Amino acid sequence: THKLEEVLAISDEVTVMRDGKAVGNVKTSETTAKDLARMIVGRDVLLRVDKTDAKPDGTVLEVKDLSVSGKNGPAVKGVSFKVHAGEIVGIAGIEGNGQTELIEALSGLAKATGGKVEFAGNDVTNQSARQLKELGIAHIPEDRHKRGLLLHSDLAENSILGVHYRPPVASGGMMNNSAINKRVGEIIKNFDVRPGDPTLSAKSLSGGNQQKLIIGREFDLNPKLLLVSQPTRGVDIGAIEFIHRKLIELRDAGSAVLLVSAELEEVTALSDRLLVIREGRIVGEVDPKVTSVEEIGLMMTGGD
């Protein structure tokens, strides 16, 4: 496991591996999360999200009474909220309560059955994924294998997904290899994708490096709005720290971010405002700085 809380709660002793080698063995009672993180990554790791207060600006995304169907009937039921430039709005909830369908409707991967979605004041309800991307909406999907990557294609090809049809990547029906190589090289460098070989297939990367490739690709769009689901699922502690820092940097650059995460500690640490979803409905909005994880958990489950 890469979950330090799990290791500390369950194990009697821990062996840490890095780059295929055992780099340490300790008794759990004699170590800390910080010590384990240092062994895993090979340096000190920031285990908390370091950020300043948000400075929200104008409304970028407004969702009005939105409904979306799922496999077994209505999944999103009359949801309304806003996301402003320069803030991260989180959605907390037990998985399977409408988060997936909500993000897919907002990103053009599913159709809304009712309500309206406005982006920068314009009605974009049920526009296609390509239309939304052209407007400045980027999407980091919850399932990187199903929605985020072509696993048998190389890093260069994966780096241009979503922009493969437009300049400078393509021109006059021809692919521009120098532009593609420049793009993938910048993503590899700026987002620390390892190994940094653009000819490797995406399936050959670790989960964390696959995730960094997707994040780098979407960030390269300079999005006005980022829809991001489960950003650190199956990712090691070093990559988690890196991804969190990049999300905060995007917020501070003025982008609006809508974040869905099943990790309650993650979504409360990153979010400036937190919406709680249960059975397809928003059941509350809280300030994560002053609301306990226990209170949020009770809202998620419908407990008293």
Image (cartoon, grey):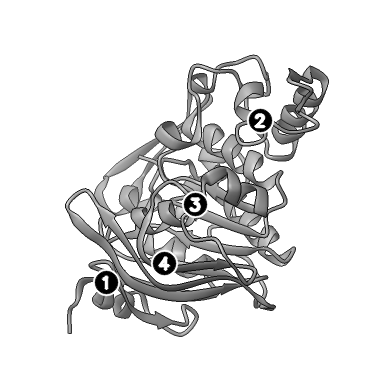
Residue drawn at (52%, 40%), measured in percent from left and top? Answer: 39
User: What mark, if any, has residue 89 been given in the picture?
Assistant: none
Q: Is residue 252 left or right of residue 28?
A: right
227 and 6: which is toward the camera: 227
**Mark 4: secondary structure:** strand
Tell me, yes or no, whether the two marked residues, 3 and 2, touch with CB atoms within 8 Å.
no
Q: CA distance from mark 2 to mark 1?
A: 38 Å
Tell me, yes or no, whether the two marked residues, 2 and 1, touch with CB atoms within 8 Å.
no
| Amino acid beneath label 3 | Ser
Above-or-below relation of 187 to 53:
above
Per the image, the residue denoted by label 2 is 160
Q: Position of residue 130 (x, y in %)?
A: 58, 43
Per the image, the residue denoted by label 4 is 91
User: What mark, if any, has residue 107 been given in the picture?
Assistant: 3
Q: Which class describes the residues within 10 Å of circle 4: few (<14), some (14-19), or many (20+)? A: many
Q: Earlier in the sequence, mark 2 or mark 4?
A: 4
| Amino acid beneath label 1 | Met
